[in-house]
Image: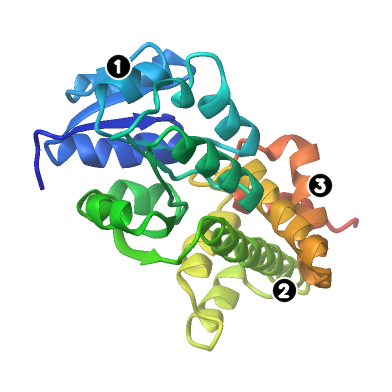
Amino acid sequence: MAKSVEIGYIGMGIMGSAMAGRLVEAGFRVTIWNRSAGKCEALVAKGAKVADTPKAVIDRCDITFACTSDPASARAVVFGESGVLAGMRGGKKFVDMSTVDEETAKEIGVAVTAKGAQFLEAPVSGSKGPALQGQLVILAAGDKPLCDEAKPYFDVMGKRTFFLGEVGNGARMKLVVNMMMGINIAALSEGLAVGTQSGLQGTDILEVLKEGALNCPMISLKGPAMLEQRYDTAFPLKHQQKDVNLALSLGNQLGQPMPVAAAANETLKAAKAAGYGDDDMCKVYEVVKVRKVE
């Protein structure tokens, strides 16, 4: 990997700051930008540079990554005043790692490539812990040569990269994954709630699940946190609900019935309405479980 390459990273949220931090710690020359400049300070202390605008990042860097929170913010970063598109030209490379719908991914891809630049979508599967540990799964689609060129950087940020073909496939894959995660966290919440209400020990429920076909890392990680009411944010509940909702929109476009995802979405919406949007997604448990009335 050429450490002389100038790398840009736009978006210093939970995921973006972790991925950019991996690149900085690996010794790459990284320039960052975030709408709230204060979120850049930790990486500046580690050696990153800060640009004033997304355009300034593009101007300075050979390849720029971005990770924003939703379709609206992804579009704003690209199409806004002094945004990514303002700096795009031949030879520039842009990799959007945001979780968005396929229409947004395609819209950004068309705009970037119209400027003569290269575009790749690369949303990721994983939350804060895997991002900090470089254990994300990267779901790339679009420009295959750019995917190959970005692979060394992806290898710093993740444990495996999939190339899924044309732009839009990365977004669709990410929505499938996060839809199923939303369903599973709602199911785990209901299982723990009804089990503990019936007199079972929550820890016993998790131990039984661990030994059977339902064993998975999410249950092992989130189950104890739910029982112990530890809701430090690894993946914000509001983003989980946003992704399930985007998956439902995809289902509507295709005419695909998705009643289980729809039910999970309503549970997540209730948790968001209760004020838990910025907490970890597993805080959905707090609106599922019911206190017994003596």
Residue denoted by label 1: 50
Residue denoted by label 3: 270
Residue at the spot 54% in from the left edge and 83% down from the top edge: 208
Report the side of 247 relative to 213 (left or right): right
What is the number of the mark on residue 235? none
Q: Front-most of 223 and 175?
A: 175
Of labels 1 and 2, the one closer to you: 1
Local crowd size for mark 3, using a 10 Å CA cut-off: few (<14), some (14–19), many (≥20): some
Q: Secondary structure at mark 1?
A: strand
Q: Front-most of 228 and 265?
A: 265
Q: What's the distance in space between the residues labelled 3 and 2, CA to CA?
A: 21 Å
The mark that comes first in sequence, 3 or 1, is: 1
- Mark 3 belongs to which amino acid? Ala
Q: Is residue 67 visible?
A: no
Report the side of 283 relative to 208 (left or right): right
Report the side of 197 relative to 43 (left or right): right
User: Residue 151 appears at what percent x and percent y?
Assistant: 25, 55
The mark that comes first in sequence, 1 or 2, is: 1
- Mark 1 belongs to which amino acid? Val
- Mark 2 belongs to which amino acid? Gly
Q: Secondary structure at mark 3?
A: helix
| Residue 250 falls in image quadrant | bottom right
